Image (tube, rainbow, N blue to C red):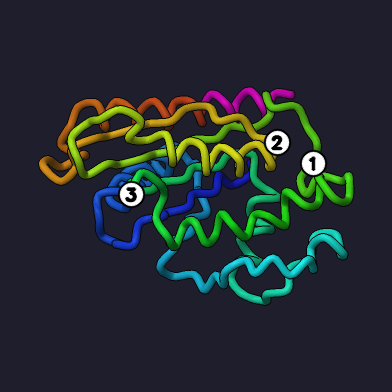
């Protein structure tokens, strides 16, 4: 079984996004699914500088940092889960820096005509976004997260299976909500069914 990859995009390693992911990981492990988790705060990811190295050399980036291990994990996985709070209607700055470095993945396809990942059908992959907004719900509160991360999934040839959103996190604990508990259970069941289905092929 391949490992799901989880990106924890909060600037706070003990914040609600991280607590949610920790609970999800615990439940996945109970079902013998062992994800590879990356905490954005523990990674050294330099900003994309639009230097054209990836345009001139397939799959190459000018920087030699922790993004190299993230690239390989994204290339190998068939499940990606990304969690981020909403900062000014978008993902966090540290996560955005990582997303910008996915330009190399886009360029593999756009410039070199050769996808960075296996060009398999979308049914063999699953992607999830978990977004938390501190403010009470308002129109388009989570649109920025969906748009920015949606491009990453598209370049990984991976469908965005579901976007779980939670508003008002400044006022209540997400994990105390039945909605969040049900959503975690849903993700776990989805992945159990997914890996069973893939394993049978």
Expressed as whole percent of the image width and height from the top left, the position of residue 85 reads 33, 48
Helix, strand or loop for disc 1: loop
Location of the C terminus (image quadrant): top right
Expressed as whole percent of the image width and height from the top left, the position of residue 150 reads 56, 37
Q: Residue at x 33, y 51 (%)?
A: 87
Helix, strand or loop for disc 3: loop
What residue span does the magenta drawing correspond to? Answer: 193-201
Tell me if label 2 and label 1 are in contact, CB under 8 Å: yes
The residue carrying pointer 2 sits among few (fewer than 14), some (14 to 19) or many (20 or more) residues within 10 Å by Cα, namely: many
Residue at which label 3 appears: 88
Expressed as whole percent of the image width and height from the top left, the position of residue 124 reads 68, 29
In the image: residue 112, left or right of residue 83: right
Q: Nearer the viewer, mark 1 or mark 3?
A: 3
Location of the N terminus (image quadrant): top right
Q: Nearer the viewer, mark 3 or mark 2?
A: 3
- What's the CA distance linking mark 1 and mark 3? 34 Å
Q: Residue at x 43, y 40 (%)?
A: 144
Q: Quadrant of residue 171?
A: top left
The residue carrying pointer 3 sits among few (fewer than 14), some (14 to 19) or many (20 or more) residues within 10 Å by Cα, namely: few
Circle number at residue 118: 1
Helix, strand or loop for disc 2: loop
Residue at which label 2 appears: 157
Q: Earlier in the sequence, mark 3 or mark 2?
A: 3
Most frequent secondary structure within the magenta stretch: helix
């Amino acid at each position: 079984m391949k490992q799901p990859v989880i990106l924890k995009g909060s600037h706070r390693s003990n914040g609600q996004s991280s607590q949610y992911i920790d609970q999800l990981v615990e439940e996945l492990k109970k079902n013998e699914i062992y994800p590879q988790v990356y905490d954005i705060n523990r990674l050294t990811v330099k900003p994309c500088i639009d230097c054209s190295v990836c345009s001139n050399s397939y799959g190459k980036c000018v920087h030699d940092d922790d993004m190299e291990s993230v690239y390989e994990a994204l290339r190998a996985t068939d499940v990606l889960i990304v969690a981020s709070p909403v900062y000014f209607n978008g993902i966090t700055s540290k996560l955005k820096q990582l997303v910008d470095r996915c330009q190399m993945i886009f360029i593999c396809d756009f410039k070199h005509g050769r996808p960075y990942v296996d060009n398999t059908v979308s049914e063999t992959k699953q992607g999830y976004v978990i977004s938390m907004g501190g403010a009470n719900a308002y129109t388009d509160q989570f649109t920025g997260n969906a748009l920015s991360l949606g491009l990453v999934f598209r370049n990984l040839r991976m469908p965005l299976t579901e976007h779980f959103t939670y508003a008002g996190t400044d006022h209540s604990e997400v994990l105390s909500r039945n909605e969040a508990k049900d959503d975690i259970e849903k993700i776990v069941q989805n992945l159990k069914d997914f890996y069973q289905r893939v394993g049978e092929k």
